[in-house]
Amino acid sequence: MSRPCPVCGTTVLAGEAFCEQCGHDMSFVEPAPAPPSAFAVAAAAGRSSPCTACGSDSVGSEGYCENCGMLQPTGRDHMEIELGPMAGVSDRGLRHSRNEDAMALITAGEDAIVAVVCDGVSTSPRPDEASQAAADVAAATIAKRLAEGEGPESATRDAVRLAASTVASAARPGEDSPACTLVSAVVERRRVTVGWVGDSRAYWLGDHSSLLTIDDATPGTHMLTAWLGADAGEVVPHVRSFTTDGPGAVLLCSDGLWNYYPEPEALAATTLGAPPLAAARRLVRLAIEAGGHDNITVAVIPFGQGERAETTVAFPKERSD
């Protein structure tokens, strides 16, 4: 059975160890796939998945919540991934006809985990395809580069370059290429490295909760000044690393969440103290309850078990390789 290369999209036949086009190692572990439907999985297990609108555990067999009456989204409309210590939830929201967000979670050896969140640009063609391709390529590339001994900052830049190339090359004859934003996190034992292009965000939640990213957008608007694909020009990601000795969590999210809850302290109050999947579900549900105007994607990655009294957060200056 053939499968596409996650880096360049070339079809690779079963049994082939490397992509003939780009040389990608096809034996390398790829990002954890999202289940086809969180609700179908729950039903098959004889239990009820929480309603995305009200959080009730009263979703019936036909997909309607018996508490609020909302028909639950299926397939990519609502996705949940739980991988080791981290989890992510992505939901279509209440206003969009499809989910144009995407996420990818992957482990990289024993000491590092990688998460990527992408938000498709609705004014471009096939933004849902762009976001998923970018998330998958970026996550797989970062993990592969780390396994080869590359540092997280350099690995992040390589990953964004390949993701941008993948999205830009997806244009069909006679149309612009699809487009999306991207934010990634590499979480190691004592260091977190984030990279981004666009206005999807990363937060540190814990002592000194902080927004880690700066939106590539015109101030006061949602007009992007940088993105992947669709006449983006040269894509140069922002990359930043920080260290902390105290416990907390790294949160990646699309603007479907931060439009309603932009402040780090409010996000921390909702996230900390709950298991990652429960926290991600709660944040998505809060955005839906606030109006659900956009697609919503949240990835929660717990970090550190050090002493709170010794917590330090340091942001080094931006540097290029």
Image (spheres, rainbow, N blue to C red):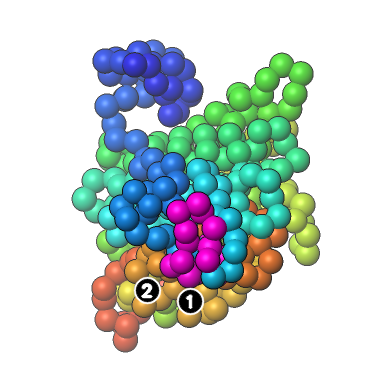
Residue 64 screen position, x and y as percent:
54, 58
Q: Secondary structure at mark 1?
A: helix
* Of residues 149 and 232, the one drawn nearer to the viewer in this rendering: 232
User: Does residue 165 appear left or right of residue 146 in this picture?
Assistant: right
Identify the residue at image location x=35%, y=42%.
Answer: 32
Task: Rate crowding at label 1 as few (under 14), some (14 to 19) or many (20 or more) other CA atoms within 10 Å.
Answer: some
Identify the residue at image location x=71%, y=16%.
Answer: 173
C-alpha span from label 1 to label 2: 8 Å
Q: Secondary structure at mark 2?
A: loop
According to the image, label 2 marks what residue?
274
- Residue 270, disc: 1
* Of residues 149 and 92, the one drawn nearer to the viewer in this rendering: 92
Contact between labelled residues 2 and 1, with CB atoms less than 8 Å apart? yes
Would you say residue 320 is visible in this rendering?
Answer: no
Identify the residue at image location x=27%, y=39%.
Answer: 147
Would you say residue 53 is visible in this rendering?
Answer: yes
Quarter of the picture containing the N terminus is top left
